[in-house]
Structures are given as C-alpha cells and as structure tokens.
Image (cartoon, helix red, strand yellow):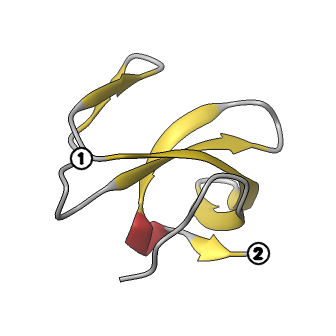
C-alpha cells in the first residue's frame, strides 16, 4: 500500500476528471470532514487532502496517486 505524508502533491479521479491537491494529514480513526464521515482505521488509513480549488476531503490511499 502506498503511503503519503503531509505536503505530498497528489491526484485522484473525480466526477469532473482528474483532481489535484496536497495531503494535509493521515487519519487512522473515524473523522468528520466537511459533514462526511471518513471511517479510517490503523490498517486502512485515509488522508485529508486540500484540493487546488480549496476544498477538503478524505481519500483512501488506493484512490490517490503521487503527482
């Protein structure tokens, strides 16, 4: 599994095509992000990413690619 750290530039597939952003932090427990619940665990962490357009969301490692 790929691991990311704060400051990594990443991309992912979104409804509008490919999105880009920066990893803010790794989460390993259930966390609310902009009204959505990210069910992260130590075995399946998720990453809070700020997109280039200013939005924040949690993404699973498998959905992200280093840019």
Secondary structure, mark 2, is loop
Asked if labels 2 and 1 touch by Cβ distance under 8 angstroms, the answer is no
The residue carrying pointer 1 sits among few (fewer than 14), some (14 to 19) or many (20 or more) residues within 10 Å by Cα, namely some
| Residue 23 horizontal side relative to residue 44, left or right | right
Residue that carries the numbered disc 1 in the rendered image? 40
Which residue reaches farthest top? Answer: 35
- Residue 35: x and y in percent read 39, 16
Q: Quadrant of the C terminus?
A: bottom right
Up the image or down, 9 lies above or below 40; here it is: below
N-term-proximal mark, 1 vs 2: 1
Secondary structure, mark 1, is loop
Up the image or down, 11 lies above or below 30; here it is: below
- Residue 50: x and y in percent read 68, 40
Q: Quadrant of the N terminus?
A: bottom left
| Residue 10 horizontal side relative to residue 62, left or right | right
Which residue reaches farthest right? Answer: 52
Residue depicted at x 22% and y 62%: 44
- Dividing the picture into quadrants, the one containing residue 11 is bottom right
Residue depicted at x 59% and y 65%: 13
- Residue 39: x and y in percent read 21, 41
The residue carrying pointer 2 sits among few (fewer than 14), some (14 to 19) or many (20 or more) residues within 10 Å by Cα, namely few
Residue depicted at x 69% and y 65%: 10
Residue that carries the numbered disc 2 in the rendered image? 67
Count of numbered circles in the view: 2
In front here: 17 or 23?
Answer: 23
- Residue 3: x and y in percent read 46, 73
| Residue 39 horizontal side relative to residue 32, left or right | left
| Residue 32 horizontal side relative to residue 23, left or right | left
Up the image or down, 3 lies above or below 29; here it is: below
């Amino acid at each position: 599994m790929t691991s990311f750290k704060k400051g990594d530039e990443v991309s992912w597939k979104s409804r509008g095509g490919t999105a880009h952003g920066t990893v803010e932090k790794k989460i390993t427990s259930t966390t609310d992000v902009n009204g959505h619940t990210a069910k992260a665990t130590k075995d399946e962490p998720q990453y809070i990413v700020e997109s280039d357009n200013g939005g924040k969301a949690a993404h699973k490692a498998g959905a992200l690619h280093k840019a």
